[in-house]
């Protein structure tokens, strides 16, 4: 049975925990990720740091595919759209506590490999999932 990605669930839980703790949640985002919609001025060194505290954003939605909200950049309200897979970390600005998410590149490659094409292993059940270490 295939399971849905855990990242969006963890992001929502950590966001709530950080806010309930009286801290300011920030997202660290890959600025080069396809589908990312943020002002160019927010990008620095291939990354974007976004303050997603309730006092900094409006209309925050964190669903399983996308984080979207309205925020002010240079005094101008702008819509922001961040694919969940682009989020590298969520943390509290005040103390750095939070979570860094692992790269999912290896998982995507494993998922895209047609079943039964990997060498070695048990070929009796080609539909059975296989685990492998990705470094």
Image (cartoon, helix red, strand yellow):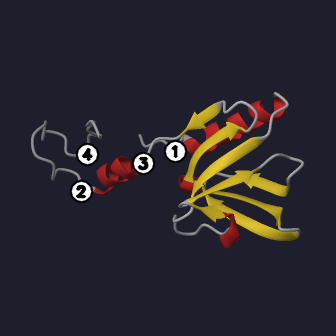
Q: CA distance from mark 4 to mark 2?
A: 10 Å
Please state which of the two labelled residues, at mark 1 or mark 2, is closer to the viewer. 1
For the residues labelled 1 and 4, say whether their Cβ atoms are less than 8 Å apart. no
SS at badge 3 = loop
Q: Position of residue 105 (x, y in %)?
A: 38, 52
Identify which residue is drawn at 13% across, 36% down. Answer: 122
Image quadrant for the C terminus?
top left
Q: Quadrant of residue 68?
A: bottom right
Q: Which residue is mark 3?
A: 104
Image quadrant for the N terminus?
top left
Q: Residues within 10 Å of mark 3 (few under 14, many from 20)?
A: few
Pick whichever, 129 or 14, lies toward us: 14
Instruction: Give the mark nearer the N terminus: 1 vs 4.
Output: 1
Identify which residue is drawn at 26% across, 40% down. Answer: 128
Q: Position of residue 95 (x, y in %)?
A: 71, 30
Instruction: Give the mark nearer the N terminus: 4 vs 3.
Output: 3
Pick whichever, 62 or 41, lies toward us: 41
Please state which of the two labelled residues, at mark 4 or mark 3, is closer to the viewer. 3
93 in relation to 108, above or below: above
118 in relation to 121, above or below: below
For the residues labelled 3 and 1, say whether their Cβ atoms are less than 8 Å apart. yes
Q: Quadrant of residue 86?
A: bottom right
For the residues labelled 1 and 2, say whether their Cβ atoms are less than 8 Å apart. no
Q: Using residue 89 as the reference point, say whether residue 14 is left or right of it.
A: right
Identify which residue is drawn at 15% across, 48% down. Answer: 118
Q: CA distance from mark 2 to mark 3?
A: 18 Å
Q: Using residue 123 as the reference point, say whether residue 92 is left or right of it.
A: right
Q: Which residue is mark 1?
A: 5
User: Which numbered marker is on residue 127?
Assistant: 4
């Amino acid at each position: 049975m295939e399971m849905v990605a855990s990242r969006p669930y963890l992001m929502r839980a950590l966001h709530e925990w950080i806010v309930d703790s009286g801290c300011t949640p920030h997202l660290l985002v890959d600025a080069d990720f396809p589908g990312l919609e943020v002002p160019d001025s927010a990008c620095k060194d291939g990354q974007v740091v976004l303050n997603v505290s309730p006092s900094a954003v409006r209309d925050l939605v964190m669903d399983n595919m996308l984080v979207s909200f309205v925020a002010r950049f240079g005094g101008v309200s702008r819509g922001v759209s961040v694919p969940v897979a682009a989020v590298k970390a969520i943390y509290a600005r005040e103390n750095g506590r939070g979570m860094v998410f692992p790269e999912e590149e290896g998982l995507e490659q494993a998922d895209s490999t047609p079943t039964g094409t990997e060498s070695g292993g048990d070929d009796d059940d080609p539909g059975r999932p296989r685990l492998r270490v990705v470094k």
